[in-house]
Structure formats: C-alpha cells, structure tokens
Amino acid sequence: MSHDENLRQPQKIEMYERMAHDLNNLLSAIIGFCYLLKKQTSQNVAAQDTLEELLKAATKAVEVAQGCMTIRARQESNGLPVTVDTKMPSIHNPETILFAEDNSDVRRILKSILEDNGYKVIEAVNGTDAVRLFLENEDEIQIVLLDIIMPGKGGGEVYEEIKKVNPMTKILFISGYTGDGLLKNKIAEEGLNYISKPVEPDELLIKIRDVLDK
C-alpha cells in the first residue's frame, strides 16, 4: 500500500463508520415505529401480518449492517457484548429517564416507546442540553440514556460532567457508531452499561430495567 493510500485509509474508515451510525439510527426508527404500530393495531390481523413482514425485513437489514461493520470490529481488541437479562421490564414504576439523542426520529420513537411502558422521559437534543436538564432535574432522574456521538458535548463529556455532580447516577450508553475507540475502551474497562443501535424495543426495555435494578 502506498504512502497516500495509508493516509487515506483512516478517512475511509471514518466515512464508513459515520454511514453505519446514520444507518443504525434509521433502522432504530423503523423498528421502533413497527413496534408501536403492532401494539396500536393489535385487533387488525392484516395489519399485524404486514408489520410482521416489515419487521422481518428490518431485522435482515440489521444483519446486513452488522455484517458491514464486522471488518472494523475485528480491528479492535475490546468488544462490547450486550448482556440481556431474561426478566421482562416493569411498566408500573414511575421512574424518570433523561434521554439524550440528537437524531429527532430516534428520539421521538424511543421516547414514545419508553412512555408507553410507564416511564417519564425528559428529552435532551444534544450533550449540552443533557447536562443542563440533568442539573435542573437531578433529584427526579433515575437513569440517563445517553447517545455517545452528539454535537457539542459528546456522550463521554456528558458522562464525566454528570458523574462530578452525582457519582451514583445510573447511565446507559447507546450508539450506532463504532469509531469512538477511546470511549469504547473506557466503557469496557470500567464495566459501564452499553447497548448498540439498532436496538429492539424489548431489548432496550429489558436493559434499562436491568440497569435500574442493579
């Protein structure tokens, strides 16, 4: 490989990672909307069949996206497996979630899913907004659902600022971006909570319940 190709390689990897990040956000929104529609049309057999096929197609798309990221994943020595508890989430506890996500579609659909399952959600549109809302609502918040890549302050910066205020705050990182190696290493080394996009709604609800119950 030539010197110029060596210089361009990191740029190509960064481009592919950002494309994967955007695709994961899109798939998260599609899967989330299907989840809500299945609940809203539970008495409509035809709609249920159609949505089931759409979910199957979305699941296949997830597999393709994950396959495209396999080469990058092999380049990193520290993986981030998602451990999912088998117990189902409770819909009876009025816990409050501070949810920081800059993608409006993902934020809107996941907020609807969380509220539909009994949680109160405080929305933050970026990292700076997340820190502000945490400071204003610290006593009310039980868990922070934190996207890793956001404009302004990223998830790592928000995490550090929140922990300075209250080290006991429960935080769950969520991201469809594979490129932030330093933060991923930190997550792995410190045993922090992480779940990757695109995420199945039931998987997310179970993970949130697991973090809250620790």
Image (spheres, rainbow, N blue to C red):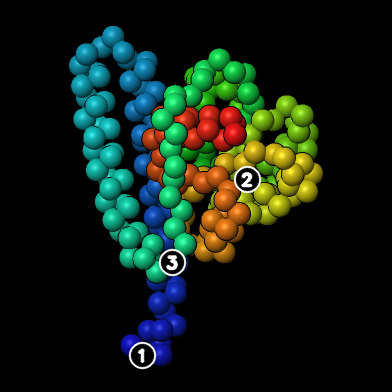
Secondary structure, mark 2, is: loop
- The location of residue 172, given as percent across then percent down, is 57, 41
- What residue sits 28% from the left and 56% below the top? 67
Identified at 38% across, 49% down, the residue is: 23
Q: CA distance from mark 3 to mark 2?
A: 27 Å
* Furthest-top residue in this view: 43
Q: Residue at x 20, y 21 (%)?
A: 49
Other-residue count near label 3 (Cα within 10 Å), few / some / many at <14 / 14–19 / ≥20: few
Decide: is 59 above or below 94: below
Of 117 and 108, the residue lying toward us = 117
User: Are the two marked residues, 1 and 3, in contact with CB atoms closer than 8 angstroms?
Assistant: no
Relative depth, front residue between 109 and 86 = 86
Q: Earlier in the sequence, mark 1 or mark 3?
A: 1
| Disc 1/disc 3 C-alpha distance (Å) | 23 Å
Q: Amino acid at mark 3?
A: Glu
In the rendered image, which residue does mark 3 sit on? Answer: 76
